[in-house]
Image (cartoon, rainbow, N blue to C red):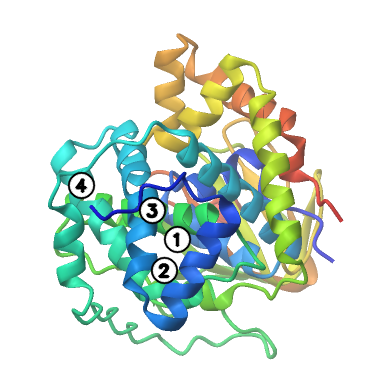
Amino acid sequence: MTALASPPPDADALAALITQVAETRDRQAYAALFKHFAPRIMAYLRRGGMGAGEAEELTQEVMLTLWRKAGYFDPLRAGAATWLFAIVRNARIDRARRRRDATLSGAPPLEEADAAPSAESMSLVTEREAQLRSALNSLSPEQKEIVQLSFFSDTPHAAIASKLNLPLGTVKSRVRLAIAKLRILLEDPS
Amino acid sequence: MISHHPSPETLLAHAAGTLLAGHTVVVVAHVQGCAHCQAALTRMEALGGALMEDLAPEPLAAEAFAQVLARLDEPAPKPPPPPRQTNLALPSGLRLPVALRGAQIGRWLRIGRGLRYSRVRLPWAPEQNVMLLKVAGGRKVLHHSHGGMELTQVLWGGFHDETGQYGPGDIGEADETTEHQPIADPEGCVCLASLEGGLRLPWFTRLLGW
C-alpha cells in the first residue's frame, strides 16, 4: 500500500485521522485509515460468512463511505472503531436486502444527523471504550463467543444454537446472561 | 418519562444489525426519543467496534487501495426520494417519528369499533408487517398470547396491562411467552407496531372479531 510502517494507531490517533480526512480531505490520513480498518472490516465480513470477493467489494464500499461521511464523525460521541462499526453494519444490512431483491430501494441513510448532541469529552469516550474492552476480556470464553456470534452472524440465535449445541429456546436466555455480565453496556456511567 | 425500553437482546440485535427490518423501525422510533437507549446503543456499537478491532486482520487484494483511491472523487449515490405519504388524521400535537421517513403510510382503515389501522410499507423490506394503530379510549382486549415477537411503541395516549402503564415513548415487547390483557387509556392510544411473521393483526385487535 503505502510506506506507513509505523505501529498501529491507537483510538485517539484514528479519531484524529478521520477528522483530518473530514477537514482537509487528506489522502495520506485516508491511506493510514485504509491500512488499519480495511483488513479488519474484511475479517468481520468474512466471519459473518460472506465470500471473499463479496467481502472485498463491500469493504471497498465501506471505505468509500468513510471518505464521504467523515464530516459526520463526532469524536465526542463515539470512537473511530464504534463509528466505523455502525457503517459496516448498515452496509451489510443493505447488501443483504439487495441480494434478496435487486429492485428494492435502499433504506433511508444512516441517522447521522439525528444523533443527540453529547456532553462528553473525548477522553471520556476513550476511557469508556477502554473499560468496555476490559469488560469484554473478563468474560468466560463461552460467553465471549456468544457475544461474538451475536454480532458476527447473520442469524445469531441459530448460529449460537448450532455452535454450542443448545436448543434455540435456551439461546435467548444465554444471550441475556452474557449481556448482563457486561453490565457496563447497560448502565449509564453518569 | 419513559419507563418501558426494548429488552437488552432486542437492542443488541439492533446494534449488531440482525433485527428484522420491521422491528428495527419501531426500535429506532423508540431510541430517537430515549436518551437512555441512545446511550446503551452507543455502548453496544462500541462493543461491536471493539470486537471488530480484535479480529485478526485479513488482507485485501494488492490493488484494492488503488481501486478505492480512484473512486474517491466519484459523486456519492443519491438516496432515493422519500415516498409520498398519506396525510393521516392524527391527534393534534402528534408527529410521526422520523424513523418512518422513507416508509409508505396507508390511510386509516376502520377495522372494528374503536380501532383504526394504517399499513406501513417499508420500500426496502416490503414483506415486513408494520402498522399504525389508533385505539379508542377504554377498549379492553381479551387475554391473549402471541405468535412471534411483537413490538409496540406508544406515540400518543397510552394503555396499561399486567406489566404496567405505557405512555408516549414507551415500547412494549411481547413474544410467544407473553399473555396479557391491555386496556387503552381514556383518551385512547396511537401506536406504531411491528409483528414477526406474515400479515396479521396484533393483540390489540383480537377482541374485534378478526
Whether marks 1 and 4 lie on the same chain: no
Residue bearing mark 2: B119
Kindly check if marks 1 and 4 are in contact, taking CB atoms under 8 A apart as contact: no
Along the polypeptide, which appears first: circle 4 or circle 3?
4
Q: CA distance from mark 4 to mark 3?
A: 12 Å
Task: Identify the residue at horizontal 74%, vertical 44% (top origin).
Answer: A186
Counting from the top left corner in percent of width and height, residue B125 is at 31, 59
Name the quadrant of the N terminus of chain B: bottom right
Q: Which of the 4 image quadrants contains residue A138?
A: top right
Q: CA distance from mark 1 to mark 2?
A: 6 Å
**B67, A111: nearer the viewer:** B67
Left or right: residue B44 versus residue A186 is: left
- Check disc 1 and report its element: helix, strand or loop: strand
Residue bearing mark 4: A56
**B70, B155: nearer the viewer:** B70
Q: Which mark is residue A88?
A: 3
User: What's the residue type where badge 2 is placed?
Assistant: Arg
Q: Which mark is residue A105?
A: none
Kindly check if marks 1 and 3 are in contact, taking CB atoms under 8 A apart as contact: no
User: What's the residue type where badge 3 is placed?
Assistant: Val
Residue bearing mark 1: B130
